[in-house]
Amino acid sequence: MMRTRRHALGQNFLHHKPTIEKIVATVAAEMKTAERAPCSLLEIGPGKLALTRVLSPLASELKLPFYLVERDRYLEEEIRAGAPDTELHFMDAATELLPELIDSMRKKTLTPLFVASNLPYSASSQILANLCHCSNDLSGAVVMVQKELAQRMAAPAGEPERGALSLLIQSYFEVHVAFDVGPGAFTPPPKVQSTVLKLRPLALPLTQGLREPLKFEHFCKMLFSHRRKMIRNMVPNEKHELFPKLGISGTERPETLKLETVLGLYRGISGEGI
């Protein structure tokens, strides 16, 4: 029963000490060099406290409040006993509650937060989308995700891994690969490799100024739901006049387009202006 529930929550608990120390060292370095210095630290999904126990001394050293967000209430007693100096919030980080919480934390201090997380595989994409939606409240993030997902997040134009998630993440963050982590670092060991990423918020999101940024996300998903089609076959005929203005012919496929070009297409089609 317990194993089934863990599987349903997408939980693979990190236990490999050298990997844990390497992640925390990456967090420390990113916090030190962030363009906007963080005033608090937020860990999403502390689980069995593998990262938490090493992050906590770092937060204390930097005199930062340390917040935890956990979905699994079965872990409450263990978390409260093992991390008494943290502020614990039980919620599903894959819902809109996470951006609301981060916004409220930011308003308390008027300075941004730094996020660290071994993200659950089953909810990584939605949690990352939530971080995009509150990127102005963040000074940075270090997250561990499935390697395949990391490749999609970081993929530049022209790479086969390029997709709607690439455009979403890169609209809000610079994405930098830190290092890979093998299955043996987890309990139970997953069947896939993992990757630790450094996310650095853009000074201004590329969606800045859009009336409805969520509609741009839907536009990206639409493009990549037909990734083998040429762009001209997905854009209304009366909007083909946009192509020369954007420096494309219309025969391109979605994964070959630069993010700025996709934004220009969306602005032109939606009437927001290129």
Image: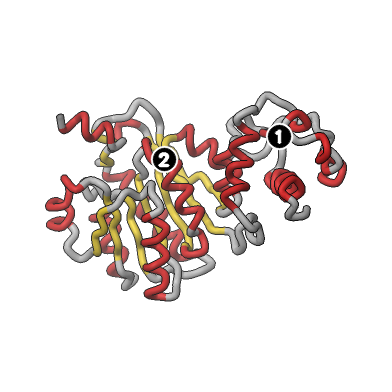
Q: Nearer the viewer, mark 1 or mark 2?
A: 1
Residue 129 vs 157, above or below: the answer is: below
Tag 2 residue: 145
Q: Is residue 250 left or right of residue 49?
A: right
| x then y, percent, for residue 226 | 64, 27
Q: Residues within 10 Å of mark 1 (few under 14, many from 20)?
A: some
- The answer to which of 210 and 258 lies nearer the viewer is 210
Q: Nearer the viewer, residue 173 or 126?
A: 126
Q: How is the image coloured?
A: secondary structure
The quadrant the N terminus occupies is: top left
**On screen, 160 above or below 139?**
above
Tag 1 and tag 2, C-beta contact below 8 Å:
no
Q: Label 1: which residue? A: 256
Q: Position of residue 85 (x, y in %)?
A: 20, 66
Q: Residue at x 26, y 40 (%)?
A: 13
Q: CA distance from mark 1 to mark 2?
A: 24 Å
Residue 245's tag is: none
Q: Secondary structure at mark 1?
A: helix
Q: Earlier in the sequence, mark 1 or mark 2?
A: 2
Q: Give above or below for 208 relative to 260.
A: below
Q: Position of residue 22 (x, y in %)?
A: 36, 49
Q: Which residue is rendered at x = 64% and y = 32% of the image?
A: 159
Answer with left or right where residue 241 lies relative to residue 138. Answer: right
Amino acid type assigned to the residue bearing label 2 in the image:
Val
Identified by mark 1, the residue type is: Thr
Number of marks in the rendered image? 2
Residue 143 shows in this picture: yes
Residue at screen point 80% across, 33% down: 250
Q: Residues within 10 Å of mark 2 (few under 14, many from 20)?
A: many
